Image (tube, rainbow, N blue to C red):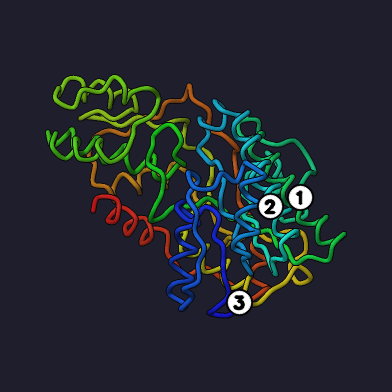
Amino acid sequence: MNKNDKIFVAGHNGLVGSAIVRKLEAEGFTNILKRRSKEVDLCNQQQTYELFEKERPDYVFLAAAQVGGIMANSTYPAGFIYRNLMIGCNVVDACYRYGVKKLLNMGSSCIYPRLAPQPMKEDCLLTSTLESTNEAYALAKISIIKLCRYYNQQYGTNYISVMPTNQYGIGDNYNMETAHLLPMLMRRFHLAKLLRNNDFEGIRADLKKYKLGWGLDEKLDLTSEESIKECLAGIGAYPDKAIVWGDGSVFREMMCSDDLADACFYLMQNKDYKDIGELVNITDGTDIQLKELIPMVKDIVGFDGELVWDKTKPNGTPKKQMDATKIKSLGWTPKIDLKKGIEETYKHYIS
């Protein structure tokens, strides 16, 4: 990529897309094409084609997706598979039709089988059963990985697919119904801390900025402290305790979105499909058990109430450690320490 190339970041307002934009801007790129979903619906083929025909981007980062945590995936499987399939199919085909030089397709560690050998190598894709709680999302992402591969095979395009591990960072989603693990934990502990401190003004400020989800926003009366307490209890936040799902036995990797953006920029600048193959994991190859991660988040937030594990709720995939051999062989390694990254993300959240 050259500094004057037009670069389309699909999903520029999301966690990953916004990190990619920050990275591009830090590297001196100014011709960055951004479109909100209200302006161009990438699920709509005609709107997608019209955008590409008018703007003619040189490079595309496909970070647009419908995403969410374990409960959102379980509750809205039709929406997850439909929207992610349509977005991916429309953007990949538009890249081919309108001469995009290179596409980076953003996948997910959810594509790998539930009981894949650990750490998960790229070649374990489709070797056994997927995790049922996010199967719809995984199937959509797998389909777009294969679509990129077959376009490369049939048309000689240069489309690469990356599989990031679990992300967190600036610009995350804090809606408790659809958020991923870390922002959900961070906000639950933060609201519980405010309750414990009887800081209802702080709670009101938070609730005006971010939705709770689960239909709680419609019930919420910000003028009533009792209504606030009742709604926060609906997300497991109490003055004396915070409730989290599962038993803490599962393992998860966590990576700051700015590290992922750095990896994506590096690959777009330096590596092609012939170097990467069908896909490459973006990870440092280490994970952490939730029994350790969740108390770490609790301490960083500063909530000193009780941590309660709701063992009636699902844990999800037991272990999702990804293998970092390929990405390291390509010349990239992450730079942001987990604890430091969470601390910086929390500072940004409360600011």
* Residue type of the residue flagged with mark 1: Cys
Residue 282 image offset from top left, x and y in percent: 60, 61
Q: Work out which residue is located at the far right of the displayed protein and give it.
A: 154
* Residue type of the residue flagged with mark 2: Met
Residue drawn at point x = 54 percent, y = 45 percent? 251
Q: CA distance from mark 3 to mark 1?
A: 32 Å
- Disc 2 secondary structure class: loop
* Residue type of the residue flagged with mark 3: Met
| Left-right relation of 38 to 186 | right
| Left-right relation of 192 to 312 | left
Q: Name above or below for residue 18 compared with residue 76.
A: below
Camera-side mark, 3 or 1: 3
Q: CA distance from mark 1 to mark 2?
A: 7 Å
Q: Quadrant of the N terminus?
A: bottom right
Residue that badge 1 annotates: 124
Disc ID at residue 120: 2
Cβ–Cβ below 8 Å for labels 3 and 1?
no
Disc ID at residue 250: none
- Disc 3 secondary structure class: loop
Residue 35 image offset from top left, x and y in percent: 50, 54
Residue that badge 3 annotates: 1
Q: Name above or below for residue 192 compared with residue 277.
A: above
Residue drawn at point x = 54 percent, y = 60 percent? 9
**Label 1 crowd (10 A; few <14 / some 14-19 / many >=20):** some
Residue drawn at point x = 63 percent, y = 52 percent? 50
Cβ–Cβ below 8 Å for labels 1 and 2?
yes
**Label 2 crowd (10 A; few <14 / some 14-19 / many >=20):** many
